[in-house]
Image (cartoon, rainbow, N blue to C red):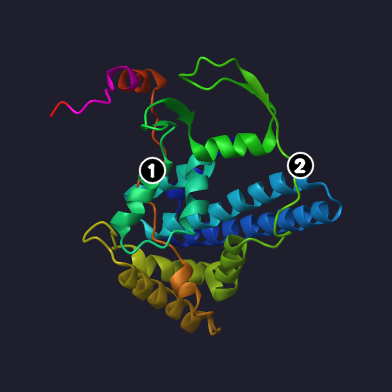
Amino acid sequence: MGWAIRHLCQLGRGDFYSAIAEGIILVIESAVQLANAAESLVVAEHHRGAQILNSLCLEECSKVLILLDAVRCPNAERSPTLANFYNHIAKGIYVEAFDWRSGTFQEHEGYVNQARDSHYLDGPNGVEWIFPNKITQAREDNMYVNYVRDDGSDESPYWTQPTNQEPTFGYSSSDLLLFVSSLSAAGLDSPEGIECVAEVWRNVDPRQPNMSVTELWTLNSETLSRVASRKKIEVDKRLVRLWPYPLWPLKLHKDVEVDDLLVVQENWSPYDPY
């Protein structure tokens, strides 16, 4: 059995809408099961297992947003958008982007650019140490024991292990899970609902011009109103302001070579030549 998510691009319009709707239903079912299992582990005080399942739940939720972006994007962008289904950094950006409250798409893009690099420099002067991607590192730290050494450091390698700490504020279903579940309840888990998304968004590029958040809300409102009318259901109007900008125009993962960062470190000087 091989990964075939890009095969969706080869489907005709009706079959594509049906396949996306089916995928959204299955992904949300999976996310809810993981969330319920995580809650049970918290009750049993198995906090590490709960943390792992909760992070997997969020990754599943991100897939709903990826599938919807595959509907909101032009046909030519479907394949690279769907490829995010398998990329941990891309899925992590979708999770984080749900909480961003960007005033414009350009501002949103800036946040993405800060989150996507495979490695980056940081330190008192911004160049002292080389770190792996924060999303990748957080995922690793949450799940695995590792023997690591800080790049660019003379310190000896050391072991790291996941924590088994009780959540500070207890356990509750994530806002992202509640959001994607609400989208499903609003009819976006049906071929008719998916068709409404395509009708509103298929000719929209948030880069041209730089989409404002009020323009985003207008498109979200039009989308949800069409679904409500077609499905004869009531829609939670709060979804209008919660549905984030589409991320399909952006590259959500950028490989940065450690050797290139070492060159930056070597050439850096604290003295302003001017």
Residue 21 seen in this snapshot: yes
Quadrant containing the N terminus in the rendered view: top right
Which of the pair 184/106 is nearer the observer? 106
259 in magenta: no
Q: Is residue 240 left or right of residue 59?
A: left
Where in the figure is residue 56, as x and y percent of width and height?
Answer: 65, 47
**Residue located at (38% from left, 73% from top):** 217
* Up-down relation of residue 198 to residue 93 (above or below): below
For badge 1, the amino acid type reads: Gln
**First reached walking from the N terminus: tag 2 or tag 1:** 1
How far across and down, in percent of the image, does residue 51 sit? Answer: 70, 47
Q: Is residue 66 visible?
A: no
- Disc 1, SS: helix
Classed neighbour count for the residue bearing mark 2: other residues with Cα under 10 Å, few (<14), some (14–19), many (≥20): some
Residue 270 falls inside the magenta stretch: yes
Amino acid marked by disc 2: Asn
Which image quadrant for residue 203?
bottom left
Magenta region: 265-272
The residue carrying mark 2 is 164
The residue that label 1 is drawn on is 114
